[in-house]
Image: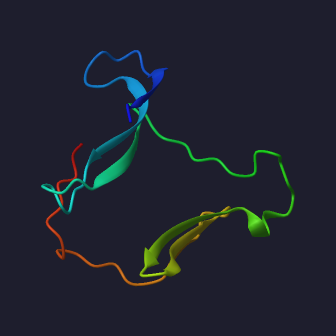
Amino acid sequence: MPDIDLGEASAWREGDYHGRVKLRQNQIYPTSPKRDVLISGPESIELSINTNLEVDHAKNKFYFTTHWGNTKKIVAILDSAGNLYLAGGVTEGQYQIELGY
């Protein structure tokens, strides 16, 4: 599947100045055919909820989920007040991950 080029997103002409959705090499298994989904932008990336201006903010949340075997697990929730709830703890140094793209 080709990258989805959303077009020019910055007047700055260094690096990639387009917004994109693309597949990239998996960061944990670099020799595997597995791929990561990358959403990239030169300035910032906005994920928006409550675009209908609903006044009930209880349901306006971002859910970060994964699958553990056949079970879907919520690993984090970000609510509309900016509170981040983590299912586990913050761990450093467990993986050697290249953070660039």
What is the basis of the colouring in this image?
rainbow
| Residue 98 higher or lower than 5, as above or below | below
In the rendered image, residue 36, in percent from the top left (x then y), is placed at 33, 52
Q: Position of residue 51 (x, y in %)?
A: 76, 45
Q: Where is residue 54 in the image (x, y as percent from the top left)?
A: 85, 54
75 or 67, which is in the foreground? 67
Q: Quadrant of residue 97?
A: bottom left
Task: Locate the N terminus by quadrant.
Answer: top left
Q: Which of 69 and 48 is in front in this view?
A: 69
Please name the residue shown 26% across and 20% down the image: 14
Residue farthest toward the right in the current orientation of the protein: 55
Q: Quadrant of residue 18?
A: top left
Image vertical order of residue 21 relative to residue 97, above or below: above
Residue 73 lies, with reference to residue 62, above or below; the image says: below
**Quarter of the figure with residue 61:** bottom right
Which residue sits at x=45%, y=75%? 67
In percent of width and height, residue 58 lies at 77, 70
Count the labels in the image: 0
Q: Which residue is drawn at 20% across and 63% down?
A: 28
Q: Name the quarter where the C terminus is drawn.
A: top left
